DNA sequence: ATGAAAGCGCTAACAG
DNA sequence: CTGTTAGCGCTTTCAT
């Protein structure tokens, strides 16, 4: 049994008026007499008339749909972003069409095409890790569709953007360690060729510099996953006696080192303080609960949608592209003093 | 600059043929001469023609879009489900329109309406915690739209369903505890009026019964959040000396008890074994890593979409509604022997 | 104050 | 083999 919907034409027929009259009455067009207007409206309500969004979109050349391409849904940060986007978009009368690239370039291209085929009004995108080449995005942009990048932005495209201030987050984290008494701070870093690796490293370096603490490169380890921590445990343990603080580039590495240390008799934070980055669900259940930098995915999502809708609704307004920077904040818990 | 798309009409005009010819050529209609077909196809490719999905949907009365209503996106289980749905739907040529109810009944109703307005071909829904009344879903179903419930199903609606076998999961978990030597097993349970509370409790009870271990109700505590564990810590500690195993209704409570115990000198699993339920990201980073029951959200998502598409593509086939049961499996890690 | 007609982009009878 | 026509559901001139 196919769902059959009532149309304006149906109503017109049943009421003995023309479709145009029904259409106008429904949207309070001034030309329509109060009488017919009420007639139509009450009738429409009675038969539960609902406008067909498809027809509307086709007619108006506007879908009120926002297309999203995200690397992975199953990721606390990204799902927070999506949640923020959904909430705001929904509140503004837009719906979202969501695609995940699964960190796969080819799929990102297809996703983009699908969204374009559906004539979404605008695009929200965070690029996949395997994306090295940006023709697909270039083309989309050239065709004139509004687009905002978030988190994983693309430098060679001039668009609105929302990013977290990784530098500042790292600086705050490291400063916190310094201000609570640490002097020899180990940094577990992401590769320098990744933006987050670079920026967080630099924030760390800046904090040291601000406090006249010399930067010791032997205290910066390329080590950004739990697994890597585990495989580098020996090295970390040889370093341990000479350090009093650790800044991990993300929560999982921070928690992983903490565990390695604890298993070897170190007390956190009495012997060594630890700060992470991200504030996912694992931070709170760590033992002790992890002091970390909160990344505000939800807020980032809202901001991205805000930027996009603003552009959609200020038609031609040649506003310069904006880069909105979300400043993360420190969440003090128990792994630091 | 509005994105302007090339249409079939445009192509027809430029090639001096009729729109229908173009339409047919593009889809390899047998009536079209190979010559014109190639002409049209290469030209279409050159100008990057892309069919307008909106127009297509309107025409075909089929949107190839699946509507999803989920309580919360930011939740490991649900985001896994979404991911599974997205992947399969995408592979089958469908796109997804995703709404979150935020556990709010009113919003669930609106979400449903929005999806219906967009004429999604089918619905995937997991009901919100605050939903006590099902008229909106009843109406949708009566109107004939295919619908599959997953995880949080609604008993009074006769539809396809996908659920996890909570009873069996709990039975497996408890059995594992028993088989590794535990006899006095504490169960941290969800309220009995919730399905998961009831089913997991019963699975626990069944396992005991199968092994002729008497069920001691004083070892069943209504306690299903981390916070609750913390506020009941005293009581738990008085119970601790007499127990050798714990089955937590979810991972966070399991991890929380484990921590309370550890802080008080108990060794896990030497003194007490612990098993959780869910297998979210927190399970692996717990220390020691948590033995738990894997809930297979991704698989559930795929299954739900499979059921839905099957119904969409077997037009009238009056297949009886199916309830697909996902049997969770035990993931042995280090909190049990 | 209301209706007729055209058209958004596409497809599918029906002609020829 | 190709073109003409009508229509999916809706809005919006242009008439009346």
Image (spheres, coloured by chain):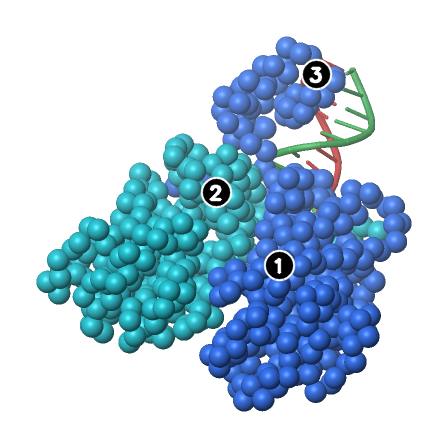
Chain colours: A cyan, B blue, C green, D red
Under circle 2, the secondary element is loop
Q: Tell me if I can see residue B103 in this picture.
A: no
Q: Which residue is mark 1?
A: B332
Q: Residue at x 84, y 51 (%)?
A: A1
Q: Tell me if I can see residue B208 in this picture.
A: yes
Q: Nearer the viewer, mark 3 or mark 1?
A: 1
Residue A10's place in the image compared with A116, above or below, is below
User: Residue B326's quadrant in the figure?
Assistant: bottom right
Q: Which residue is mark 3?
A: B32
Discs 3 and 1 lie in a common subunit: yes
**Crowd band around label 3 with a 10 angstrom C-alpha radius: few (<14), some (14–19), many (20+):** some
Q: Position of residue B214 (x, y in %)?
A: 79, 80
Q: Label 3, label 1: how many angstroms apart (C-alpha)?
A: 62 Å
Q: Residue at x 52, y 77 (%)?
A: B266
Q: Nearer the viewer, residue A262 or B69?
A: A262
Residue A230's place in the image compared with B113, above or below, is above
Q: Label 1, label 2: how many angstroms apart (C-alpha)?
A: 29 Å
Q: Residue at x 70, y 16 (%)?
A: B32
Disc sitting over residue A103 in the figure: 2
Q: Nearer the viewer, residue B43 or B267?
A: B267
Disc sitting over residue B315 in the figure: none
Q: Label 3, label 2: how many angstroms apart (C-alpha)?
A: 41 Å
Tag 3–tag 2 contact (CB < 8 Å): no
């Amino acid at each position: 049994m196919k769902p059959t919907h009532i149309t304006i034409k149906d109503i017109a027929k049943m009421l003995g008026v023309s479709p145009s009259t029904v259409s106008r009455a429904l949207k309070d067009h001034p030309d329509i007499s109060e009488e017919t207007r009420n007639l139509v409206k009450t009738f429409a309500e009675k038969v539960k008339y609902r406008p067909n969004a498809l027809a509307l979109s086709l007619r108006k050349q506007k879908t009120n749909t926002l297309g999203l391409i995200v690397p992975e849904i199953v990721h606390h940060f990204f799902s927070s972003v999506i949640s923020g986007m959904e909430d705001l978009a929904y509140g503004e009368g837009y719906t979202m069409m969501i695609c995940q690239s699964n960190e796969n370039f080819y799929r990102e291209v297809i996703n983009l095409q699908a969204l374009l085929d559906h004539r979404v009004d605008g695009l929200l995108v965070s690029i996949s890790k395997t994306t090295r080449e940006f023709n697909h995005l270039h083309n989309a942009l050239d065709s004139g569709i509004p687009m905002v990048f978030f988190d994983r932005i693309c430098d060679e495209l001039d668009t609105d953007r929302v990013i977290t201030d990784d530098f500042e987050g790292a600086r705050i984290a490291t400063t916190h360690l310094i201000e609570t008494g640490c002097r020899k701070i180990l940094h577990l870093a992401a590769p320098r060729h990744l933006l987050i690796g670079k920026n967080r490293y630099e924030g760390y370096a800046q904090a040291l510099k601000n406090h006249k603490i010399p930067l010791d490169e032997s205290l910066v380890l390329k080590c950004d996953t739990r697994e890597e921590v585990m495989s580098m445990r020996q090295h970390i343990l040889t370093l341990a006696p000479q350090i009093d603080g650790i800044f991990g580039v993300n929560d999982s590495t921070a928690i992983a080192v903490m565990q390695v240390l604890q298993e070897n008799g170190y007390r956190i934070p009495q012997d060594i303080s630890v700060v992470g980055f991200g504030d996912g669900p694992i931070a709170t259940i760590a033992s002790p609960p992890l002091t970390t930098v909160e990344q505000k995915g939800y807020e980032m999502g809202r901001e991205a949608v805000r930027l996009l809708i603003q552009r959609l609704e200020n038609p031609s307004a040649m506003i310069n592209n904006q880069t909105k920077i979300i400043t993360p904040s420190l969440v003090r818990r128990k792994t630091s003093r």
